[in-house]
Image: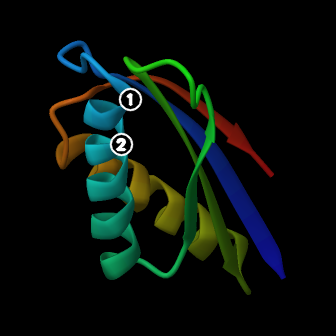
């Protein structure tokens, strides 16, 4: 069993409240979960309304497949939001 993880940080400059941020967060997570079989959750910066930090975990039987899936999810999340992806941290 191979796992791959990533932590993505987005900046949401137009968010004026935590409610604005939650709308972006919920939309991203719902879109990604409906398309991919991966665990995605908000993992940090919950109290900062212009910063969203998402954690992603992928499990596969092959390292190459897990890495490819993680990269595809990252590209998907980046292209399906008005928020700017400012940092990517990859883990094992």
Write the residue at 25% across / 33% down.
20
Q: Secondary structure at mark 2?
A: helix
Q: Say whether marks 1 and 2 touch (CB < 8 Å).
A: yes
Q: Position of residue 44 (x, y in %)?
A: 65, 33
Task: Give neighbour class at mark 1: few <14, some 14-19, many 20+ (Cα, 10 Å).
Answer: some
Q: Name which quarter of the figure residue 35 lies in.
A: bottom left
Q: What is the x, y in percent for residue 58?
A: 63, 69
Q: Residues within 10 Å of mark 2 (few under 14, many from 20)?
A: some
What residue lies at 73% left-to-right and 86% top-to-bottom? 61
Q: Nearer the viewer, residue 23 or 73?
A: 23
Q: Compared with residue 59, is residue 42 higher up or lower down, i.e. above or below?
A: above
Secondary structure beneath dot 1 equals helix
Residue tagged 2 = 22
Which residue in the protein does label 1 denote?
A: 18
The answer to whether residue 61 is above or below residue 32 is below
Residue 30 vs residue 73, the one in the foreground: 30
């Amino acid at each position: 069993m191979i796992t791959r993880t990533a932590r993505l940080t987005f900046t949401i400059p137009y968010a004026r409240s935590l409610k604005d941020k939650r709308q972006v967060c919920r939309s991203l997570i719902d879109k990604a979960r409906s398309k991919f079989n991966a665990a995605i959750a908000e993992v940090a910066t919950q109290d900062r309304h212009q910063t969203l930090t998402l954690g992603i975990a992928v499990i596969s039987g092959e390292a190459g497949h897990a890495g490819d899936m993680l990269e595809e999810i990252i590209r998907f999340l980046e292209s399906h939001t008005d928020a700017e992806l400012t940092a990517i941290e990859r883990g094992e």
